[in-house]
Image (cartoon, helix red, strand yellow):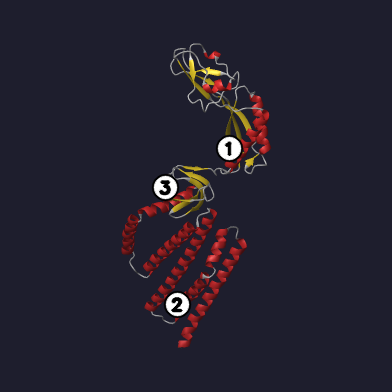
Amino acid sequence: MSVSWQLFWPALGLLVGTVAGLAVRAVALAGVRRWTRGPALTMLGAAIRIPSLVWSLVFGLYVAIETALDVSHLSPRLHGQLRLVLEAAVILSVTVVLASLVGTLMRRASERQALGGALSGLAQTASRTMVFGVGLLVLLDAVGVQITPILTALGVGGLAVALALQDTLANLFAGIHVLADKPIRVGDYVKLGDSGEGFVIDIGWRSTRVRSLSNTVLIVPNQTVGRASITNYSLPEPRMALSLKISVETSVDPDRIEALLLEEATQTVGHVPGLLGDPMPEVRFIPGFGEYSLDFTLGCHVATFVDQYLVQHELRKRIIRRFRAEGIRMPVPVRAVHLLDGAPSVPQAWARSGSVDAGPLGAGVRHDVEDASTVSAPAPGAAYRHDSDGPHAGGGGRQFQ
């Protein structure tokens, strides 16, 4: 058999095998494009589009080698070497495809989980490096290199690196745990134990960055974040309840106060950013009876945590103006101290005002004020409370309301 005839059959095998591989490739890609219903198959089709050309050529070369072995009396040694080259080419191409596919999956997962750019890039690099490492070990094993000593060396080296980078790896895995468990997310307003509070602006591979309301950035190691007691004001939703305590004189009708507070809060909705009308504001006679006042609680809802400051500011101003217009006074405590050494005397500040009758305080008792320059006289007829247990109790006093 002539040399040209011996080369004809391998060349024909190469052509037929390559064409068959390209045909299978075209059918597979067309099926992926036609029947794709999710992103996984789309990514798979994009990943194998170019390497599948290499696979088609490798298949053609394989057919040509096997044909040459039967027809052209190819030496077994050369046949084995050529098959080893083709096997290595397939292993390398599959490794590249898997690394690209894993990197794309990690990137999309990072986008869905809103991971930081640094951590997302680190995850993609780590996953691709791992795939390339496994592919290299498989390739070395295929060409006859013993990988057991390599694995042993890698294990010992990995242990040494882990001990040297203990704190760094602790922060890395703590960051992965935070991202998987999702106690905080980028954009949430959180309080990290005693470390501080603010908006989460980034969750990196080593630390978490929090921007406080004073526009300073707090950098907290992920290990500290993982151990801290976290209060997330943005979960389960940014809306939060706000309570304002309002105290009035005991002589005021509670129903009137409730109606006034509810009216002011309802009218404020829509005029103050962040104050919500749903749920509607409500007023409760809680905590109730104070020592010298009636205490009410005005409850409302704000859109976010930081909206509460402006809402409190505006509501308090409106309530004060309304109380002044309605003649409702907020109570101010006044304390008097009386001594047991002689005839009764009216405190200097009250005597100058000439508006208080000290007769009911009792005969034979001298009354004085702790700081007469800072205590104003109560209104005529104001109620008072006797703090002493008896007429001879030292240090007693009367609380005016």
Q: Which amino acid, mark 3?
A: Thr
Q: Earlier in the sequence, mark 1 or mark 2?
A: 2
State which quarter of the image contains the C terminus: top right
Please name the residue shown 55% across and 62% down the image.
43
Cβ–Cβ under 8 Å for marks 3 and 2: no
Query: Which residue is nearer to you in this view: 340 or 19?
Result: 340
- Quadrant of residue 313 within the rendered picture: top right
Residue visible at 60% across and 64% down?
33
Q: Residue at x 53, y 67 (%)?
A: 48
Q: Nearer the viewer, residue 47 or 271?
A: 271
Q: Is residue 183 visible from the viewing direction of this image?
A: no
Relative vertical location of residue 392 with respect to residue 114 in this rendering, above or below: above
Q: Is residue 331 above or below residue 272?
A: above
For disc 2, the marked residue is 65
How far across and how far down the image is residue 167, in percent? 37, 53
- Residue 233 position in % (x across, y down): 53, 43
Among the 4 quarters of the image, the one containing residue 323: top right
Q: Find disc 1 in the rendering and name its residue.
A: 241
**Could you say which is closer to the camera, residue 334 or residue 131?**
334
